[in-house]
Image: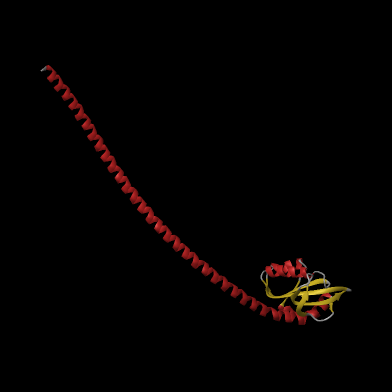
Amino acid sequence: MEELIEAQKKSEERLSRLEKVVEELAEAQKRTEQRVNELAEAQKRTEQRVNELAEAQKRTEQRVNELAEAQKRTEEEIRRLSKSLKDLNIRVGGISESLGHPLEDKAIAKLPAILKEKYGIELFEGLKRDYLENLQGRMEELNFFGFGEKNGSKIFIIGEGKARFGIKDLKDFEKKIKRFGKKYGEPFPIVVTYIFSKAELKDELKTKGINFFLSYELE
């Protein structure tokens, strides 16, 4: 009887331990399920974030496409404006040239007498507008030029006629003078214009030894 009582006691102890283990397993299962739920929620948030990023990427690509299209339109507009500007420059150049020719004609007609009276330069022939070979052996168009003599020295008249004479015209004319140098004698540069783009240009021309006449001075 005592042995049965002892065995019963041991069985109850084992049963208690089993119950405790079951409780622990149940608690662990509960924690596992909670963790699974947390992971599922995290996965849900991740998927939501991925969807948001995909949507943002879609909007970004759309914006990039819009910018590319805008850039394309801008480049097309720039090309169109460049062409318009080029056409305008051609037209302005043509107008400037057409205004320059009367100046050159005045210079060709009136300067020989002025050169003789004011500067003591005797021209071998009259002035003319034509092409002339420069130091590089290239034929170059001159607004007007002529050959003469002063005190026994050869003089080369090289002239530029511009409706409105500016800084760029001065630089271009100086380069032209250098391209001829003293090939035909001592250069005697002359500028004929209706007006200078800046009043200071007159002093600059004097400093550089370039003679100039306004159109009315050739009347």
Foreground residue, 179 or 19? 19
Foreground residue, 178 or 209? 178
Foreground residue, 88 or 199? 88
Q: Quadrant of residue 6?
A: top left
Q: In which quarter of the image is residue 142?
A: bottom right
Q: In this view, does 84 lie to the left or right of 205?
A: left
Q: Please indicate, yes or no, whether residue 53 appears anywhere in the rendered image.
A: yes
> Who's the residue at 80% across and 80% down the image?
112
In the rendered image, residue 122, in percent from the top left (x then y), is placed at 85, 78
Q: Is residue 204 left or right of residue 30?
A: right
For residue 112, above or below residue 44: below
Q: Please indicate, yes or no, whether residue 219 appears anywhere in the rendered image.
A: no
Quadrant where the C terminus is found in the figure = bottom right
Q: Is residue 185 left or right of residue 64?
A: right
In the rendered image, residue 10, in percent from the top left (x then y), is placed at 17, 22
Q: Is residue 130 left or right of residue 52?
A: right
In the rendered image, residue 137, in percent from the top left (x then y), is placed at 78, 72
Q: Residue furthest left?
A: 1
Q: Which residue lies furthest to the right in this view?
A: 152
Number of marks in picture: 0
For residue 208, above or below residue 119: above
> Who's the residue at 38% across and 53% down the image?
53
> Who's the residue at 44% across and 62% down the image?
65
For residue 24, above or below residue 180: above
Quadrant where the N terminus is found in the figure = top left
> Who's the residue at 75% across and 74% down the image?
140
